Amino acid sequence: MTGRPGAPAAVLVTGRPPPPAGAGLLPTEPVSLVDLLDRVLARGVVVTGEVTLSLAGIDLVHISLRALISSARPDLFGEDEW
Amino acid sequence: MHESAACWVYAVVPDETPDTPAELTGVAGAPIRLVRGDGLAAAVSSVPRSEVAEQELASRLQDPEWLERAVRAHDQVVGALFGYAPTVPFRLATVYHSDARVGELLRQQAAALQAGLRTVTGRAEWGVQAFVAPAPPGQDGSEPEPPHPDTGRPGTAYLLRRRQQRERQERVRADARAAAQRLDTVLAGMAVAVHRGPPAARSPGGPAEPMVLNNAYLVNRDRAEEFTGGLHQQAAHLPQLRLRLTGPWPAYSFVDVAGVRS
């Protein structure tokens, strides 16, 4: 993938045949915030740290997605969908 | 280390990993350091205690701007390590009172963390999402249907047309799901592990079409080109799908099975 080492990129893969060897990849875009949230909040090693002991039971994904989506797209989700 | 600072943990890497570049910073703009012990090293940075006190952290997690900055800072550190070492990513918001306590974490969880490192070494995660491909113009169900033979009443004709549209959409979606399953089988054959996620109902900022696949594949680095090339090849034969590939990621989706729990 193009981009800095270790930096993920997103590629939209269409039904077109892959570009010939040596040509650039299909246009890349930075990963979306949702891609990041999905990993950084919902995956990775889960250890109950000391300071965050009381947060262990909270669904971080739920909290954050609600905050993110409601601020970015208030038309998408009404209160009753959560 | 400042007495009033807590330790934010980003990831675990092998003990022999060199220090990160001085200019790499984490949440709160602080530099990264490695706390070493038991053959392992935890990447941490200092965070003001006031910022991560329980109630404070809970409310910051609900602030979209703070959350986005924290998520990006966390992932940037994990990604930087992933550039030169096997990396076991930690979930956001793992905070300890001190480096010494982090050292205890390494000691207590050494076996599970070592197993996690073995899982991720020499591998990267690739995200593959599949969406129902947008219908070609003229075939999205909006074109006028011929009048139903048994009735000239416009209301009934409308309802019948709507039912036909729904049935067509359901067939299209079922077809796309079946294609996504075939794709998953091919991709899984090139991976050492698969994380199958629930397709999101809607992806903010993403395609309007339904998502029918939302998986992560753990792929050996020396098979990465075969994997991405294979995905492109499959895409050419699956016109009912639109595919989105992200990666390479540190193996966020494959470390929980190491069973690290406090």
Image (cartoon, helix red, strand yellow):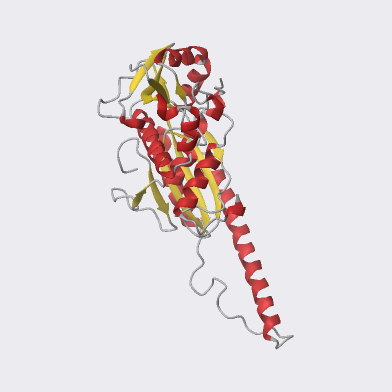
Residue ID at (38%, 23%): B44
Which of B121 and B62 lies nearest the eye of the viewer?
B62
Which of B84 and B191 lies nearest the eye of the viewer?
B84
Q: Is residue B80 left or right of residue A65?
A: left
Pinpoint residue B113: horizontal percent, then vertical percent. 49, 20
Pinpoint residue A59: horizontal percent, then vertical percent. 57, 37
Residue ID at (57%, 44%): B185
Quarter of the N terminus of chain B within the rendering: top left
Count the marks: how many? Answer: 0
Which of B92 and B62 lies nearest the eye of the viewer?
B62
Q: Is residue A46 left or right of residue B8?
A: right
Pinpoint residue B56: horizontal percent, then vertical percent. 46, 32
Residue ID at (58%, 45%): B198
Residue B183 can be seen in this image = no
Quarter of the C terminus of chain B within the rendering: top right
Q: Is residue B106 left or right of residue B81?
A: right
Quarter of the figure with residue B83:
top left
Q: Is residue B6 above or below residue B221?
A: above
Pinpoint residue B82: horizontal percent, then vertical percent. 37, 30
> Residue at the bottom extreme?
B152
Residue B57 can be seen in this image = yes
Residue ID at (50%, 40%): B216
